[in-house]
Image (tube, rainbow, N blue to C red):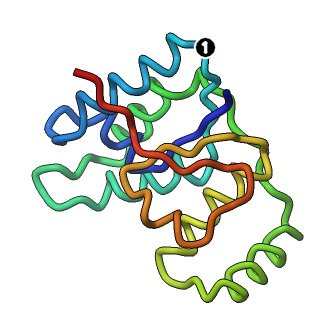
Amino acid sequence: MKFTVDSNYLICVLHSWNPHHEGTLNDLERRLDTGQEFHIVPHTLLEAYSVMTRMPEPFRKPPALVQQLLHQNFHQFPLTAIPGSADVWILLSDLGQHTLSGGQTYDRWIAWSAHRAGMQQLVTWNAKHFMSHPMPGLEITSPVIVG
């Protein structure tokens, strides 16, 4: 199964202080151990970078450190294809048709890109952000916490 994740998932993997850190890390390891294919939507990396460099103190990290953390931990996983420039018009039409706005724009961009890249599952701690307007064939799920 091909899967991708939301930025909050990446952030949980990287921050031991996060209450979801261990569960998310275990979820990722379990998925990889069972042969699931982890692909990353490029926008997810950018959103994780943005969030991690603007968090309130003491959680905020310097840009160079965030870039290093993201690269060290995720560079080995394939990136989904970046939709072409003309696709932005298709996405904007989709957003307008579904009356999505604000932060929902970025969640839709991640889900839309994942769907276009053939992902079967998007894993996030914010499933409700993606559930209101599902993409056909893209299952939205939360990390599976075992134990």
Is 90 on the left or on the right of 68, as rendered?
Answer: right
x, y percent for residue 29: 42, 18
x, y percent for residue 85: 84, 66
Kindly give the residue lying farthest to the top in the view shown.
Answer: 33
Residue located at (44% from left, 48% from top): 124
Mark 1 is on which residue type?
A: Gly
Is 28 on the left or on the right of 16, as rendered?
Answer: right
Q: Quadrant of the N terminus?
A: top right
Residue located at (52% from left, 64% from top): 131
Residue located beneath label 1 in the image: 35
x, y percent for residue 76: 59, 21
User: Where on the picture, by quarter, is residue 132?
Assistant: bottom right
Residue located at (78% from left, 83% from top): 93
Picture mark count: 1
Is 84 on the left or on the right of 31, as rendered?
Answer: right
Task: Check the image and report above or below for 66 versus 128.
Answer: above
Q: Quadrant of the C terminus?
A: top left
Q: Nearer the viewer, residue 84 or 57?
A: 84
- At label 1, counting other C-alpha atoms closer than 10 Å, the crowd grade (few under 14, some 14-19, many 20 or more) is few
Residue located at (49% from left, 82% from top): 102
Q: Nearer the viewer, residue 139 or 11?
A: 139
Kindly give the residue lying farthest to the right in the view shown.
Answer: 86
User: Where on the picture, by quarter, is residue 24?
Assistant: top left
SS under mark 1: loop
Task: Check the image and report above or below for 146 versus 120.
Answer: above
x, y percent for residue 97: 72, 87
Task: Check the image and report above or below for 125 versus 76.
Answer: below
Q: Nearer the viewer, residue 147 or 43?
A: 147
Is 101 on the left or on the right of 16, as rendered?
Answer: right
